[in-house]
Image: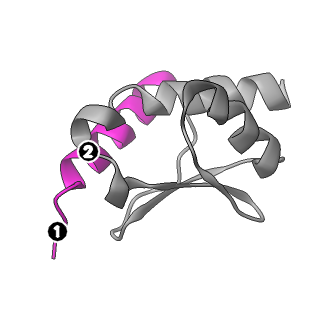
């Protein structure tokens, strides 16, 4: 069963591929995941762009279920920017 934000997930994955963000493949569900060496620091950096992701042990989780497709536009490049700022 698809959820209404599937369009946003597809947009995120397309933008991630276009900008070179290493997002984990999306198989379904409500969350997107991006591997990170220091997930807390990446999440803290994302706060600068008013993106509130969840740090996990091995990466960053983005709740696609709570973000409209319109607001999902541009998030993938911002996540990449935060990763590059933290991890060099």
Badge 1: how crowded within 10 Å, few (<14), some, or many (20+)? few
Count of marks, rendered view: 2
Q: Are marks 1 and 2 in contact (CB under 8 Å)?
A: no
Element under label 1?
A: loop
Sequence-earlier tag: 1 or 2: 1
Please identify the quarter of the rendering in which residue 51 is found: top right
Please identify the quarter of the rendering in which residue 41 is found: top right
Classify 81 as above or below 36.
Answer: above
Q: Which residues are magenta?
A: 1-19
In magenta stretch: residue 47: no
In magenta stretch: residue 14: yes
Residue 47 bears which disc, if any?
none
Residue 2 bears which disc, if any?
1
Please identify the quarter of the rendering in which residue 73 is found: top left
Q: Residue furthest bottom?
A: 1
Q: Residue at x 77, y 22 (%)?
A: 85
Q: Residue at x 74, y 39 (%)?
A: 44
Residue receiving disc 2: 68
- Is residue 65 left or right of 63 when viewed as pictured? left
Q: Quadrant of the N terminus?
A: bottom left
The x, y position of residue 61, in whole percent, is 57, 57
Which one is in front in this view, the residue at disc 1 or the one at disc 2?
2
The x, y position of residue 23, in whole percent, is 53, 46
Element under label 2?
A: loop
The x, y position of residue 24, in whole percent, is 52, 54
Classify 57 as above or below 55.
Answer: below
């Amino acid at each position: 069963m698809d959820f209404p934000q599937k369009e946003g997930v597809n947009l995120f994955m397309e933008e991630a591929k276009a900008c070179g963000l290493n997002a984990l493949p999306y198989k379904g569900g409500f969350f997107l995941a991006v591997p990170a060496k220091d997930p807390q620091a990446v999440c803290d950096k994302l706060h600068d762009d008013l993106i509130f992701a969840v740090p996990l042990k091995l990466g960053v989780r983005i709740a696609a279920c709570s973000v409209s497709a319109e607001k999902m536009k541009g998030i993938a490049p911002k996540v990449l920017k935060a990763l590059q700022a933290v991890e060099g």
